[in-house]
Image (cartoon, helix red, strand yellow):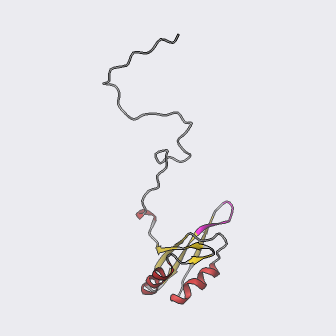
Amino acid sequence: MKSLFVGNLSFQTTEADLTALFQPFGQVGRIHVVTDRETGRARGFAFVEMPNDAEAAKAIAALDGKELGGRNLKVNEARPKGERPPLRNNSGGRPGGGRGRGGFSHEDYRESARQPREPRW
């Protein structure tokens, strides 16, 4: 049983569309179009399970880069969450962004000589 990741889908793509796309390559098990929890809208990717590994490999070879709904599909073998590289953003990996929160440096300046300050007037 192989689970395939299908990315760059049009938001209007349905399970029936994916079934029709993958069936010429072999038996299709479960199809899961991922939707947003709050809005219910499709998120632009899905997972397709195929019981036969050879058929799944043929589907990947034939469909990766194929156009569906005006978009070029990205099809590859799905990887478990633990194997993916971590996502990084500009805030050092913290959610919510890093601006406007007051910066804090982790550098150690205890041994450095202090610079004299300019007078304020």
27 above or below 95?
below
The image position of residue 68, as x and y in percent, is 60, 77
**Residue at x 55%, y 73% (from the top left corner):** 72
The image position of residue 100, as x and y in percent, is 57, 36
* Residue 79 shown left or right of residue 47 in the figure: left
114 above or below 88?
above
- Most extreme residue toward the left is 111
17 above or below 107?
below
The image position of residue 71, as x and y in percent, is 59, 72
Task: Give the magenta-colored segment's residue range.
Answer: 38-44
85 above or below 76?
above
**Residue at x 69%, y 61% (from the top left corner):** 39
**Residue at x 52%, y 33% (from the top left corner):** 102
Queried whether the magenta region covers residue 77, the answer comes back as no
Find residue 86 and report its image quarter: bottom left
The image position of residue 74, as x and y in percent, is 51, 72
**Residue at x 65%, y 69% (from the top left corner):** 11
Find residue 21 and report its image quarter: bottom right
- Most extreme residue toward the right is 39
Queried whether the magenta region covers residue 43, the answer comes back as yes
Quadrant into which the N terminus falls: bottom left
Q: How many marks?
A: 0
48 or 76: which is nearer to us?
76
103 or 121: which is nearer to us?
121
